[in-house]
Image (spheres, helix red, strand yellow):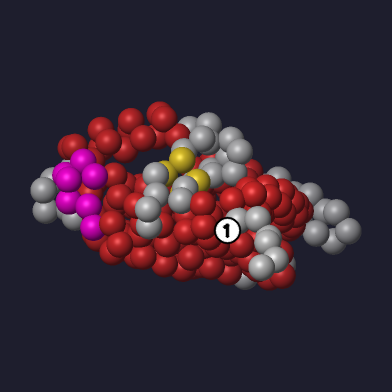
Amino acid sequence: MSGVEAPREKTFLLARPEQRLLEAIARRLPTFVRPDHLTALALLAAVGFAVAAASGAFFVAAGLLVVHWFGDSLDGTLARVRRAERPRYGYYLDHLADAFATALVGLGLGLSSQMYLFAGLALVVAYLALSINSYLETQALGRFSLGYGRLGPTEARLGLIALLVTVACGASVSVFGLTLLDVVALGGAAVMVLALAARAFGNLRVLAEREPYTVP
Protein backbone atom coordinates (compact mmCIF):
# COMPACT_ATOMS: atom_id res chain seq x y z
CA MET A 1 0.00 0.00 0.00
CA SER A 2 1.40 3.39 -0.97
CA GLY A 3 1.34 6.34 1.38
CA VAL A 4 -1.34 8.01 -0.71
CA GLU A 5 -3.63 5.01 -0.28
CA ALA A 6 -3.07 4.61 3.46
CA PRO A 7 -6.29 4.80 5.50
CA ARG A 8 -6.82 7.95 7.50
CA GLU A 9 -7.02 7.50 11.26
CA LYS A 10 -9.18 10.12 12.94
CA THR A 11 -9.12 9.59 16.68
CA PHE A 12 -9.40 13.18 17.85
CA LEU A 13 -12.37 14.42 19.87
CA LEU A 14 -14.35 16.21 17.17
CA ALA A 15 -13.54 13.86 14.27
CA ARG A 16 -16.95 12.21 13.89
CA PRO A 17 -19.24 15.24 14.32
CA GLU A 18 -16.91 17.30 12.14
CA GLN A 19 -17.02 14.68 9.38
CA ARG A 20 -20.82 14.55 9.46
CA LEU A 21 -20.99 18.34 9.25
CA LEU A 22 -18.49 18.51 6.38
CA GLU A 23 -20.34 15.86 4.37
CA ALA A 24 -23.64 17.68 4.89
CA ILE A 25 -22.10 20.94 3.68
CA ALA A 26 -20.39 19.25 0.73
CA ARG A 27 -23.68 17.79 -0.52
CA ARG A 28 -25.24 21.26 -0.54
CA LEU A 29 -22.47 23.14 -2.32
CA PRO A 30 -23.19 24.36 -5.87
CA THR A 31 -21.75 22.17 -8.60
CA PHE A 32 -19.48 24.93 -9.87
CA VAL A 33 -17.54 24.86 -6.59
CA ARG A 34 -14.59 22.50 -6.95
CA PRO A 35 -12.14 21.15 -4.34
CA ASP A 36 -9.34 23.35 -5.71
CA HIS A 37 -11.52 26.42 -5.12
CA LEU A 38 -11.79 25.47 -1.45
CA THR A 39 -8.04 24.93 -1.19
CA ALA A 40 -7.49 28.39 -2.69
CA LEU A 41 -9.99 29.84 -0.21
CA ALA A 42 -8.06 28.28 2.67
CA LEU A 43 -4.78 29.74 1.42
CA LEU A 44 -6.30 33.20 1.00
CA ALA A 45 -7.71 32.96 4.52
CA ALA A 46 -4.24 32.05 5.83
CA VAL A 47 -2.75 35.10 4.10
CA GLY A 48 -5.53 37.25 5.53
CA PHE A 49 -4.92 35.78 8.97
CA ALA A 50 -1.24 36.68 8.83
CA VAL A 51 -2.04 40.29 7.89
CA ALA A 52 -4.80 40.62 10.50
CA ALA A 53 -2.76 39.06 13.30
CA ALA A 54 0.35 41.10 12.50
CA SER A 55 -1.73 44.29 12.65
CA GLY A 56 -3.39 43.29 15.93
CA ALA A 57 -6.88 42.69 14.52
CA PHE A 58 -7.37 39.51 16.51
CA PHE A 59 -11.15 39.30 16.13
CA VAL A 60 -10.69 39.38 12.35
CA ALA A 61 -7.90 36.81 12.61
CA ALA A 62 -10.16 34.49 14.63
CA GLY A 63 -12.87 34.77 11.98
CA LEU A 64 -10.39 34.00 9.22
CA LEU A 65 -9.39 30.82 11.04
CA VAL A 66 -13.00 29.68 10.64
CA VAL A 67 -12.79 30.45 6.92
CA HIS A 68 -9.52 28.53 6.74
CA TRP A 69 -11.11 25.53 8.46
CA PHE A 70 -13.97 25.63 5.96
CA GLY A 71 -11.71 25.54 2.91
CA ASP A 72 -8.98 23.29 4.29
CA SER A 73 -11.30 20.65 5.76
CA LEU A 74 -13.91 20.64 3.04
CA ASP A 75 -11.82 20.28 -0.12
CA GLY A 76 -11.08 16.59 0.34
CA THR A 77 -14.58 15.85 1.64
CA LEU A 78 -16.13 17.46 -1.43
CA ALA A 79 -13.99 15.29 -3.71
CA ARG A 80 -14.99 12.14 -1.84
CA VAL A 81 -18.71 13.02 -1.77
CA ARG A 82 -18.67 13.63 -5.53
CA ARG A 83 -16.46 10.56 -6.13
CA ALA A 84 -13.98 12.82 -7.91
CA GLU A 85 -10.88 11.95 -5.88
CA ARG A 86 -7.41 12.57 -7.25
CA PRO A 87 -5.40 10.76 -4.54
CA ARG A 88 -1.84 11.72 -5.46
CA TYR A 89 -2.70 15.24 -6.61
CA GLY A 90 -4.82 15.85 -3.52
CA TYR A 91 -2.26 14.36 -1.14
CA TYR A 92 0.51 16.55 -2.52
CA LEU A 93 -1.50 19.75 -2.76
CA ASP A 94 -3.16 19.37 0.63
CA HIS A 95 0.09 18.91 2.54
CA LEU A 96 1.86 21.66 0.62
CA ALA A 97 -0.98 24.08 1.36
CA ASP A 98 -1.03 23.05 5.03
CA ALA A 99 2.69 23.77 5.40
CA PHE A 100 2.30 27.17 3.77
CA ALA A 101 -0.69 28.04 5.97
CA THR A 102 1.12 26.92 9.13
CA ALA A 103 4.06 29.19 8.33
CA LEU A 104 1.71 32.12 7.69
CA VAL A 105 -0.10 31.60 11.00
CA GLY A 106 3.14 31.53 12.96
CA LEU A 107 4.61 34.54 11.16
CA GLY A 108 1.43 36.56 11.54
CA LEU A 109 1.32 35.93 15.28
CA GLY A 110 5.07 36.42 15.67
CA LEU A 111 4.93 39.81 13.95
CA SER A 112 2.11 41.04 16.17
CA SER A 113 2.65 43.21 19.24
CA GLN A 114 1.41 40.36 21.43
CA MET A 115 4.02 37.74 20.56
CA TYR A 116 7.75 37.58 20.07
CA LEU A 117 8.80 36.32 16.65
CA PHE A 118 10.87 33.51 18.15
CA ALA A 119 7.77 32.18 19.93
CA GLY A 120 5.79 32.16 16.70
CA LEU A 121 8.60 30.42 14.84
CA ALA A 122 8.99 27.84 17.62
CA LEU A 123 5.30 27.04 17.28
CA VAL A 124 5.62 26.70 13.50
CA VAL A 125 8.68 24.44 13.69
CA ALA A 126 7.08 22.17 16.29
CA TYR A 127 3.80 21.89 14.36
CA LEU A 128 5.57 21.19 11.09
CA ALA A 129 7.71 18.55 12.81
CA LEU A 130 4.52 16.78 13.92
CA SER A 131 3.16 17.03 10.40
CA ILE A 132 6.35 15.64 8.86
CA ASN A 133 6.25 12.74 11.29
CA SER A 134 2.68 11.97 10.20
CA TYR A 135 3.79 11.91 6.56
CA LEU A 136 6.71 9.62 7.44
CA GLU A 137 4.35 7.29 9.30
CA THR A 138 2.19 7.14 6.19
CA GLN A 139 5.10 5.85 4.15
CA ALA A 140 6.83 3.66 6.75
CA LEU A 141 3.83 2.21 8.58
CA GLY A 142 1.04 2.48 6.03
CA ARG A 143 -1.21 4.61 8.19
CA PHE A 144 -2.08 8.29 8.12
CA SER A 145 -2.99 9.71 11.52
CA LEU A 146 -4.41 13.23 11.49
CA GLY A 147 -4.02 13.82 15.21
CA TYR A 148 -1.95 13.05 18.28
CA GLY A 149 -4.03 11.33 20.92
CA ARG A 150 -7.39 13.03 21.24
CA LEU A 151 -6.25 16.32 19.74
CA GLY A 152 -6.15 17.13 16.05
CA PRO A 153 -6.08 20.14 13.70
CA THR A 154 -9.66 21.16 14.47
CA GLU A 155 -9.08 21.21 18.22
CA ALA A 156 -5.91 23.24 17.63
CA ARG A 157 -7.85 25.80 15.59
CA LEU A 158 -10.57 26.09 18.23
CA GLY A 159 -7.98 26.59 20.94
CA LEU A 160 -6.26 29.32 18.91
CA ILE A 161 -9.59 31.01 18.16
CA ALA A 162 -10.45 31.06 21.87
CA LEU A 163 -7.00 32.44 22.68
CA LEU A 164 -7.24 35.21 20.07
CA VAL A 165 -10.67 36.26 21.29
CA THR A 166 -9.36 36.31 24.86
CA VAL A 167 -6.47 38.57 23.87
CA ALA A 168 -8.75 40.77 21.74
CA CYS A 169 -10.99 41.25 24.79
CA GLY A 170 -8.04 42.74 26.66
CA ALA A 171 -6.72 39.83 28.71
CA SER A 172 -3.03 40.20 29.42
CA VAL A 173 -0.42 38.12 31.19
CA SER A 174 3.24 38.89 31.77
CA VAL A 175 5.57 36.07 32.77
CA PHE A 176 9.25 37.04 32.67
CA GLY A 177 8.41 39.58 29.99
CA LEU A 178 6.38 37.09 27.94
CA THR A 179 2.78 37.74 26.93
CA LEU A 180 -0.12 35.29 27.12
CA LEU A 181 0.39 34.38 23.46
CA ASP A 182 4.11 33.81 24.07
CA VAL A 183 3.47 31.53 27.03
CA VAL A 184 0.86 29.48 25.19
CA ALA A 185 2.98 29.26 22.01
CA LEU A 186 6.12 28.13 23.82
CA GLY A 187 4.18 25.78 26.07
CA GLY A 188 2.37 24.34 23.07
CA ALA A 189 5.64 23.89 21.20
CA ALA A 190 7.13 22.04 24.18
CA VAL A 191 4.12 19.71 24.39
CA MET A 192 4.35 19.04 20.65
CA VAL A 193 8.04 18.13 20.95
CA LEU A 194 7.27 15.70 23.78
CA ALA A 195 4.39 14.17 21.80
CA LEU A 196 6.67 13.80 18.79
CA ALA A 197 9.39 12.13 20.85
CA ALA A 198 6.93 9.65 22.35
CA ARG A 199 5.38 8.85 18.97
CA ALA A 200 8.77 8.52 17.25
CA PHE A 201 10.02 6.14 19.96
CA GLY A 202 6.95 3.96 19.54
CA ASN A 203 7.24 3.99 15.75
CA LEU A 204 10.91 3.01 15.85
CA ARG A 205 10.13 0.15 18.21
CA VAL A 206 7.45 -1.17 15.86
CA LEU A 207 9.69 -0.81 12.82
CA ALA A 208 12.58 -2.51 14.62
CA GLU A 209 10.32 -5.48 15.38
CA ARG A 210 9.24 -5.65 11.74
CA GLU A 211 12.79 -5.32 10.46
CA PRO A 212 15.12 -6.87 13.08
CA TYR A 213 18.83 -6.22 12.77
CA THR A 214 20.63 -9.30 11.56
CA VAL A 215 24.28 -9.88 10.81
CA PRO A 216 24.88 -11.96 7.67
User: In the image as oriented, which residue stretches furthest toward the front?
Assistant: 216
Label 1 Cα neighbours within 10 Å, binned few <14 / some 14-19 / many ≥20: some
Locate residue 118 relative to residue 19 in the image: left or right. Answer: right
Q: Does the magenta stretch include residue 71?
A: no
Residue located 41% across and 30% down the image: 16
Examine the image and state in which quarter residue 175 appears. Answer: bottom right
The stretch in magenta equals: 80-86
Residue positioned 25% across, 33% down in the render: 24
Q: Name the residue under label 1.
A: 133
- Residue at image coords 30%, 62%: 88
- Examine the structure image and report whether residue 83 is included in the region drawn in magenta: yes
The answer to whether residue 25 is visible is yes
Kind of residue at disc 1:
Asn
Count the numbered circles shown: 1
Q: Which residue lies furthest to the left in this view?
A: 31
- From this viewpoint, which residue is outermost toward the right? 176
Majority secondary structure in the magenta region: loop
Where residue 33 appears, x then y in whole percent?
Answer: 17, 53
The x, y position of residue 191, in whole percent, is: 72, 49
Query: Image quadrant for the C terminus?
Result: bottom right
* 202 and 60: which is toward the camera: 202
Is label 1 in a helix, a strand or a loop?
Answer: helix
Instruction: Report the front residue among 2 and 68.
Output: 2
Q: Nearer the viewer, residue 180 or 70?
A: 70
Q: Position of residue 91 (x, y in %)?
A: 35, 59
Is residue 59 left or right of 178 when viewed as pictured? left
- Residue plotted at (63% across, 66% down): 125
Position of residue 89 measured from the top left corner of the image (x, y, whole percent): 28, 64
Q: Can residue 167 be seen in this view?
A: no
